[in-house]
Image (cartoon, rainbow, N blue to C red):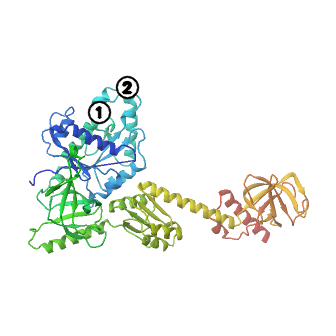
Amino acid sequence: MEGLLRTPIVSVLGHIDHGKTTLLDNIRGTAVAAKEAGGVTQHIGATEIPIDVIKRICEPLKSDWGGIEVPGLLFIDTPGHYAFASLRKRGSALADVAVLVVDVMEGFQPQTYESLSILRLLKTPFVVALNKIDRIKGWRSSRKPFVFNYRAQPEFVRRELDTRLYEIVGDLYDKGFSADRYDRIRDFSRTVSIVPVSAKTGEGIADLLLVLIGLSQKYFERSLRLHLEGPGVGTILEKKEERGLGTTIDVILYDGKLSVGDTIVVGSVEEEPIVTKVRALLKPRALQEIRTEQRFRRVKSVCAAAGVKIMAPNIENALPGSRVRAVPATATGNVDADIERVKEEMKDEIAEMKLDTSPEGLIIKADTMGSLEALALELRNEKIEAIKKAEVGNISRRDVVDAITVRDRYLRAILGFNVDVLSDAREVAMQNDIPIFVNDVIYRVIEDYENWVREEKERERREKMDRLTTPAKIKVLPGCVFRQSKPAIFGIEVLCGRIKTGVELIKSDGTNIGSINEIQNRGESIATADEGMQVAISMKKPTFGRHIKENDILYVDVGVAEGAEEELRGLLSPCEEELLRELYEIKTRRRR
């Protein structure tokens, strides 16, 4: 038993609407259609396709299957980079290989880059499925392997596909990956395979399965060898409340064997792992029986690799993304000692998964530990590293209270990924002006937060500008004197900055000529006038002709002192900054 290879686990990632689910459905449907050669097994969160079925699908491409020992492929049915990030084992990816789905018409998108970041973080080999080739103008679809169908296309269609494919090659190169179309690759260990497919028509499915089998057999053989009779080890995919069953956990078992009655240690949201016994193991009925009233069938045991639903007492606090480990009664003869050892190991694993936090920072929440890591990773990529608290679960009142204590205005926020906001938390957040950003797409959570920061900074800048007197320079327009004194009313052009009512004006020699009483634009009073505007102003103090003349240059007196630039730094335009220095020179000359 020890020398057998377990089924390689395949996960599917990619941007929204690029065809992840459709691709899985087509692979599953193709396999069901070829089931005469072997059954297609439905698992919890996964679909197993035996090697006999894959051989039948790939028959046109490969006649010699000698040396192939892998029993098939297990596709995880929870597509999405965040779900993939949740599937962990000992600090690496649970999936042996990933399929990155990219729309040939749209190319790389934000979630594609997120997926690449996670693949790099978890050091997971991957294949690119270049989807929707049937949408290329002039493409003649046929449910055949891609390499056959490609040769049957007109020359201009092949050129169009090659152009788009090499744009993807360029994007991958920019991220540090060498890539090419799969049938042009010699060394698959150094080059990422790109397999053009259509999840809609089924063309290229055979090519994709063949590449996945070849990679699994050649490069993962050592990691796929397992002790089928050893204690079961798996990752919690999801925790659910099932009618009639109570709390259950959906688990991907990736090593060993798990049986009813086994003692298991389960990762928990609390500090202490859960120790319980397997009450029942449930698996979905076969695909062809999926419409039966009884969705699940009970099994006595299950071997890796497989998805299974576990019923057990006291698993309400099970932590999605953490591990489940069976503790065999015969390990050392001292079961209690074995349980304590496994619990300590699991505590260390969960501690390693926890993120570094700081006294000041954002509150981030997610549905699983893997999702939390993915969110933190993308925040770091956006140069946002200050995180005060990072936890699994819905956003609670306690989270809002923690956010209130953050001093930095722009970090006083909560980011939630794939979670809900509890009603009392929302109420307290509104009362204390704590923004909450929740989405089921990572980049949208971060995008919404960054937009809020920009808007807040701009609002505060405007408020500060309204309070401060900022430098401005105006020119008295010739032929635009409407009244000479008490008040003098004349036309001006704003050459730089902004003027507003109440500001003091000085001449180029530093002489103060009083304040602006009113600004009028086309007969209507306005509070401010910006650079480039021509308006009329009224002033009580000066007399036109004696204190002010046509074409005079006047300045807003900002009470400039050495170091005044610091107060206004970041608020002024380059023109206003230059004007501030000019005003300082005028004041200096006058003091002499």
Q: Which residue is mark 1?
A: 146
Q: Quadrant of residue 55?
A: top left
Q: Nearer the viewer, mark 2 or mark 1?
A: 1
Q: Position of residue 320 (x, y in %)?
A: 30, 62
Q: Position of residue 194 (x, y in %)?
A: 32, 40
| Mark positioned earlier in the residue sequence (2 or 1) | 1
* Relative to 49, 491 lies left or right: right
Closest to the observer, 576 or 6:
6
Report whether residue 363 is seen: yes
Res 155 label: 2
Query: Label 1 crowding class (10 Å Cα cut-off): few <14, some 14-19, many 20+?
Result: many
The structure residue drawn at horizontal position 16% and vertical position 33%, both measured from the top left corner, is 63
Q: Quadrant of residue 282?
A: bottom left
Closest to the observer, 383 or 106:
106
Closest to the observer, 411 or 428:
428
The local secondary structure at tag 1 comes to helix
The structure residue drawn at horizontal position 29% and vertical position 54%, both measured from the top left corner, is 123
Q: Position of residue 375 (x, y in %)?
A: 39, 59
The local secondary structure at tag 2 comes to helix
Picture quarter with the C terminus: bottom right
Q: CA distance from mark 2 to mark 1?
A: 15 Å
Is 90 above or below relative to 180?
Answer: below
* Relative to 39, 153 lies left or right: right
* Relative to 300, 494 lies left or right: right
Res 111 label: none
Q: Amino acid at mark 2?
A: Glu
* Relative to 291, 425 lies left or right: right
Report whether residue 178 is seen: no
Q: Amino acid at mark 1?
A: Phe
Closest to the observer, 59 or 284:
284
